């Protein structure tokens, strides 16, 4: 069992930056695949960024070049730059894929 707690969400203006953190109850980097998903109102949850056990990263086309996923020991991060209103959503940390573990989510609102 892995417990995940996200933090770092909030309200930011377009063009701004946020850094999301996901703290796990035990070491995860190099052990599990990790990812950040988001779900906007009325939409399905989508993968935003992922990182394999070997450290290979992948990003959705909508965030490529703006978001960066990284991990250290028991924490996975999502650095979000050049934020747009369409990035507004609840963001969820995932460890171990669809059948793995999920955090409770953190809200990100991009608005002027």
Image (cartoon, rainbow, N blue to C red):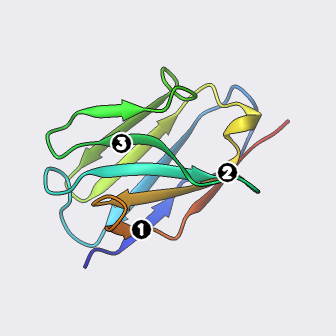
Residue shown at the point (38%, 49%) measured from the top left: 35
- Disc 2 to disc 1, how far (Cα)? 16 Å
Image coordinates of residue 95 in percent, x first then y, are 31, 60
Local SS, label 2: strand
Q: Is residue 100 left or right of residue 16?
A: left
Residue shown at the point (69%, 25%) measured from the top left: 15
Q: Is residue 25 left or right of residue 47?
A: left
Badge 3 local density, few (<14 within 10 Å), some, or many (20+)?
many
Q: Which residue occupies the extreme right position in the image? A: 112
Q: Is residue 18 above or below residue 26?
A: above
Badge 1 local density, few (<14 within 10 Å), some, or many (20+)?
many
Image quarter of residue 41: bottom right
First in sequence: mark 3 vs mark 2 = 3
First in sequence: mark 2 vs mark 1 = 2
Quadrant position of the C terminus in the picture: top right
Local SS, label 3: strand
Image coordinates of residue 91 in percent, x first then y, are 56, 54
Residue hosting label 1: 102
Residue shown at the point (23%, 43%) measured from the top left: 52
Residue hosting label 2: 89
Quadrant position of the N terminus in the picture: bottom left
Q: Is residue 53 left or right of residue 75?
A: left
Q: Which mark is residue 50?
A: 3
Circles 3, 1 touching at the beta carbon (< 8 Å):
no
């Amino acid at each position: 069992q892995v417990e995940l707690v996200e933090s770092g969400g909030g309200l930011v203006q377009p063009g701004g930056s946020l850094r999301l953190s996901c703290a796990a109850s035990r070491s995860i980097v190099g052990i599990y695949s990790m990812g950040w998903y988001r779900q906007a109102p009325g939409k399905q949850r989508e993968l935003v960024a992922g990182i394999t056990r070997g450290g290979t990263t992948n990003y959705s086309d909508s965030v490529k070049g703006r978001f960066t996923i990284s991990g250290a020991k028991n924490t996975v991060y999502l650095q979000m730059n050049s934020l747009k209103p369409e990035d507004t959503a609840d963001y969820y940390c995932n460890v171990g894929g669809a059948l793995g573990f999920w955090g409770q989510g953190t809200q990100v609102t991009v608005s002027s």
